Amino acid sequence: MTKSNILGSATGEISYYHLGERDAPGRPTRDRSLDTFGVRIIAEPRVGKFDYEIEALFQTGAISASLASAASRQSVSANFIHADIGYSFAAVWKPRLSVELDRASGDRRGGRYGRFDTLFGMRRADLAPAGLYNAIARTNIMTPGIRLEVTPSKRLDAFAVYRAMWLAASEDSFAGTGVRDASGRSGDFAGHQLEARLRYWLIPARLRFEFDGLLLAKGRFLRDAPNAPAGRWTKYGSFNLTASF
């Protein structure tokens, strides 16, 4: 990865990652051989100023059609894009309001394998809380959102974000849910998600409390797809304590 500061107050990055995967005794894999090329431009938040971030990734390579050792190989062509623009207000609570868009490709019938592979990375940056909730990830998803962040004090910060979610490819499974309609007849609207986080330093720099809450109102796809779990809502909450030594 390389960085450049020739964009004034913004920073530019160019990245390349290669993932090579092989079977091992008792551990079959999809034998992924993936090259991921990326570019990112970011202007950090400043009080009374607009900030922004644009990131685009292109993925190529090859992957096996299944875990079977003799499975056929497929060429890969996948992509991901993230964009957001925000504004930080000069107020006591330091509010920042932003709008954002994420799109990660999914697999379609025929042609190259198109499901974007996140490889690795933070769960929080993948559109959902860390922990047991892993339904929403950066693969086969298109989601605009609006986010509000506040920092009332050095000990307390919080944010809330709303997003609407669609499938990038209606024949593929949605994000990390495993829910799929190979015929594409269940539509491509996955639902509405409202997420919030609150963090507070019980002992500054030593012990921090965190609450995460999420409410997902399922759209047509997550209700009607053949293997969709019953129910119209998904609710998630977690309480965490982090100790720093």
Image (tube, grey):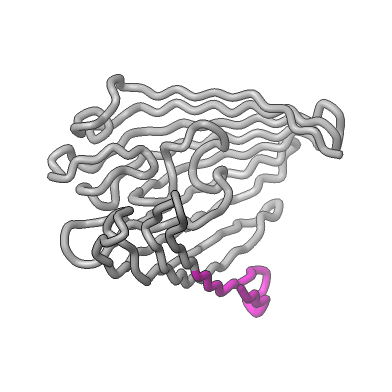
Which residue is at the far front? 25
> The magenta stretch spans which residues?
1-18
* Rendered position, 229 above or below 73: above
Total number of numbered labels?
A: 0
Quarter the C terminus occupies: top right
* Rendered position, 241 above or below 31: above
- Give the residue displayed 62% in from the left and 44% down from the top: 96
Closer to us: 227 or 103: 227
Quarter the N terminus occupies: bottom right
- Give the residue displayed 27% in from the left and 66% down from the top: 74
Which residue is at the far top? 231
Locate residue 141 relative to residue 82 in the image: left or right: left
Closer to us: 173 or 196: 173
Locate residue 205 relative to residue 140 in the image: left or right: right
* Rendered position, 10 above or below 86: below
* Magenta-drawn stretch, dominant element (helix, strand or loop): strand
In which quarter of the view is residue 201 placed? top right
Residue 89 screen position, x and y as percent: 66, 45
* Rendered position, 166 above or below 10: above
Q: Is residue 4 magenta?
A: yes
Locate residue 186 relative to residue 92 in the image: left or right: left
Residue 26 screen position, x and y as percent: 44, 49
Q: Is residue 118 magenta?
A: no
Closer to us: 120 or 204: 120
Locate residue 53 relative to residue 224 in the image: left or right: right
- Give the residue displayed 36% in from the left and 38% down from the top: 177
- Give the residue displayed 42% in from the left and 40% down from the top: 136
